[in-house]
Image (spheres, grey):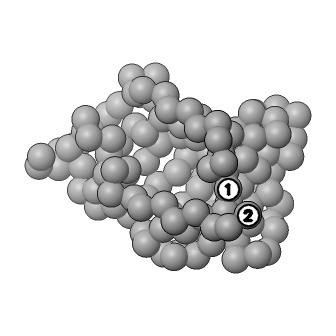
Amino acid sequence: MTATPTVRHVEETEEERWSDTRAKISFRTTIGDGETPTEGLCSGVARLEPGGWLSLHRHPVTEVYQLLTGQGVVTLEDVDHAVRAGSCVYIPPNREHGIRNTGNVPLEFMFVFQADSINDVEYIWSEN
């Protein structure tokens, strides 16, 4: 697929849910899910309900979180950082990280990977 300018609304995408040892999270990949012709970046929106989390992991591509709603804690290389709507998190390649919702409302964040497709992102899960 050749990359082209694209506009896509989050509700046009399929919601994925993980509720196992990896996470208690839902997310929609808006750009780079195999349906959009992209190159170099893919993105979407994730949602953690109160008490939700994404386990510690790493991957060989850079990632950015932009928090849209709620509050929580992001763990970066064993250091906890309080985050809230408006916080932005930069995660270099192969750095251990995870996130959890510590508030009473959903925590939503946009994620951006430096990859052509979400399917190219190889998650390496940490021992918890």
Name the residue beneath numbered marker 2. 128
- As drawn, the residue found furthest toward the top would be 11
Name the residue beneath numbered marker 1. 55
At mark 1, the secondary structure is strand
Q: Please provide percent x and percent y for residue 26.
A: 59, 34
Q: What amino acid type is highlighted by mark number 2?
A: Asn
Q: Please provide percent x and percent y for residue 10.
A: 46, 29
User: Could you tell whether 122 is left or right of 65 in the image?
Assistant: left
Q: How many marks?
A: 2
Q: Please provide percent x and percent y for residue 124.
A: 52, 65
* Image height of 83 relative to 61, above or below: above
Determine crowd level at label 2: few under 14, some 14-19, many 20+ residues with C-alpha closer than 10 A.
few
Q: Residue at x 80, y 57 (%)?
A: 73
At mark 2, the secondary structure is loop
Q: Can you tell which of label 1 and label 2 is closer to the viewer?
A: 2
Quadrant hosting residue 83: bottom right
Q: Are marks 1 and 2 in contact (CB under 8 Å)?
A: yes
Q: What amino acid type is highlighted by mark number 1?
A: Ser
> Is residue 90 visible to the viewer in this orientation of the structure?
no
Q: Please provide percent x and percent y for residue 44.
A: 47, 42
* Image height of 124 relative to 18, above or below: below
